[in-house]
């Protein structure tokens, strides 16, 4: 109960907390696609297949990495259909069914399901306490004992916990992965959503510890910073790995839509992306603070730590079943994913993931409905006792 990722159809009164994504910044979206249409004619005179991505977009993405302190050539970039397209391509290249992949526990639900359906054996590694990132002794032990072919991590504003891994943890994890021969897949889809800058500035990208891209493969996306409907992601890795990824793509989706790539190029080569980041941070910070206030007011028994970035709040539900609250919540008109979606073998039933993607008034109403569902679950438990 409460694990189905798809919402029911035809219920306009349902408040949906199932998606950690925001509506499009409408003015920027219009401008980006207007710019894309202006730039379309040269591309339209070609066959339209760009398996590695449009050259202009690959160059723009490489320039962004270089500006972040990770020198990158366009040959180190492959444009994909969203971050999930990039992750699927990396999985196909590196791991066959039956091989192991180490994952944070909890981790992003869609990636866990992707790896399960691909036949990979998941090796869960518990997250560290609080919002400090990884449990490094646990990671070293898992990599040493299991020698997984791949490891998947979210270093920047982890989904679902919101944790931010510090520089030293990043360095130590990359060193441990090298020692075990494990390729580290780093998901940066939340990296731009820093809401409260840490003292001393943000940590360095994990790829800065492996600038050649042989041991660290980075996946990024426009979906969280800009809009999930844009469906453009990318992979950064060593040039030879990118060539192999592009060759393998012939058996998958061949390439990503050209118009969307041109729109993202317009954003990245002008001021549009930076404007989107600024707007998103302001919007998400307001949403997060409103959600936190509503939870503390209506559900004071729930426990959580407020993340300094990202889009998600990982809550303990006061000893009650998060799956049961999610199930009852739909009867009260609120949909929320329960903790086991983000775990393995039923773990985290005492948790819910709450994205701060709703405006304050809607977030207040959503929490009011969750509180009503929680009372029903609590009364049922007490009645059974």
Image (cartoon, rainbow, N blue to C red):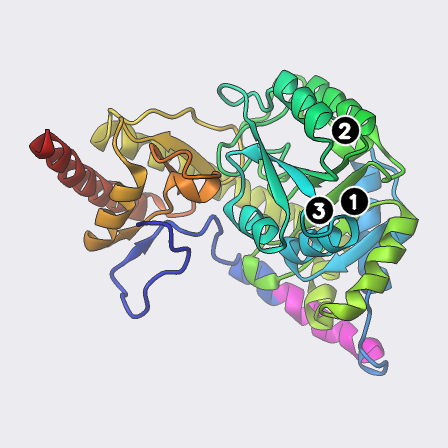
Q: Residue at 86% of width from left, 53% of height from top?
A: 242
Residue 346 part of the magenta-drawn span: no
Between marks 3 and 2 in the image, the one whose residue lies nearer the viewer = 2
Q: Residue visible at 50% across and 34% down? A: 106
- The residue identified by callout 1 is 64
Residue where numbered disc 3 is placed: 219
Mark 1, Cα crowd under 10 Å, few <14 / some 14-19 / many 20+, is some
Residue beneath disc 2: 177
Label pair 1/3, CB-CB below 8 angstroms = no
Residue 67 visible in the displayed image: yes
Spatial separation of the CA atoms under disc 3 and disc 2: 17 Å
* Residue 42 is inside the magenta segment: yes
Q: Quadrant of residue 324?
A: top left
Toward the front, the furthest residue is 98
Q: Which residues are magenta?
A: 31-43
Q: From the viewer's side, name the closer residue of 159 and 278.
A: 159
Query: Of label 1 and label 3, which has the lower sequence position?
Result: 1
Q: CA distance from mark 1 to mark 3?
A: 14 Å
Residue 285 on image: x %, y %: 46, 36
Residue occupying the point 81% across, 62% down: 248
> Can residue 59 be seen here?
no
């Amino acid at each position: 109960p409460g694990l189905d990722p798809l919402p029911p159809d035809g219920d306009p009164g349902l408040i949906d907390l199932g998606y950690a994504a925001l509506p499009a910044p409408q003015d920027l979206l219009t401008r980006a696609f207007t710019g894309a249409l202006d730039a379309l004619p040269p591309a339209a005179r070609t066959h339209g297949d760009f398996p590695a991505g449009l050259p202009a977009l690959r160059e723009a993405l490489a320039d962004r990495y270089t500006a972040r302190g990770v020198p990158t050539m366009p040959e180190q970039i492959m444009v994909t259909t969203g971050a999930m397209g990039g992750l699927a391509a990396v999985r196909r290249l590196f791991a066959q069914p039956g091989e192991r992949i180490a994952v944070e526990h909890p981790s992003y639900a869609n990636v866990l399901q992707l790896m399960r359906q691909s036949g990979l054996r998941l090796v869960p590694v518990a997250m560290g306490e609080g919002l400090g990132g990884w449990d490094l002794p646990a990671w070293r032990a898992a990599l040493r004992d299991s020698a997984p072919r791949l490891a998947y991590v979210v270093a920047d504003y982890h989904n679902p916990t919101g944790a931010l891994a510090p520089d030293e943890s990043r360095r130590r994890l990359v060193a441990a992965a090298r020692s075990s021969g494990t390729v580290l897949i780093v998901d940066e889809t939340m990296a731009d959503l820093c809401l409260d800058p840490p003292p001393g500035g943000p940590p360095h990208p994990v790829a800065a510890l492996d600038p050649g891209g042989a041991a660290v493969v980075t996946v990024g996306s426009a979906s969280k910073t800009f809009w999930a409907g844009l469906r453009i992601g990318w992979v950064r890795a060593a040039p030879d790995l990118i060539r192999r990824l592009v060759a393998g793509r012939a058996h998958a989706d061949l390439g990503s839509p050209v118009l969307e790539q041109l729109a993202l190029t317009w954003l990245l080569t002008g001021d549009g992306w930076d404007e989107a980041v600024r707007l998103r941070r302001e919007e998400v910070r307001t949403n997060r603070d409103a959600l936190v206030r509503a939870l503390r007011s209506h559900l004071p028994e729930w426990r959580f730590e407020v993340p300094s970035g990202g889009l998600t709040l990982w809550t303990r539900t006061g000893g009650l079943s998060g799956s049961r609250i999610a199930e009852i919540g739909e009867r009260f008109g609120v949909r929320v994913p329960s903790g086991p979606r983000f775990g393995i073998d039923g773990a985290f039933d005492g948790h819910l993931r709450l994205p701060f993607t709703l405006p304050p008034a809607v977030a207040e109403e959503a929490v009011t409905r969750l509180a009503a569902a929680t009372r029903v679950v609590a009364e049922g438990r007490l009645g059974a006792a």
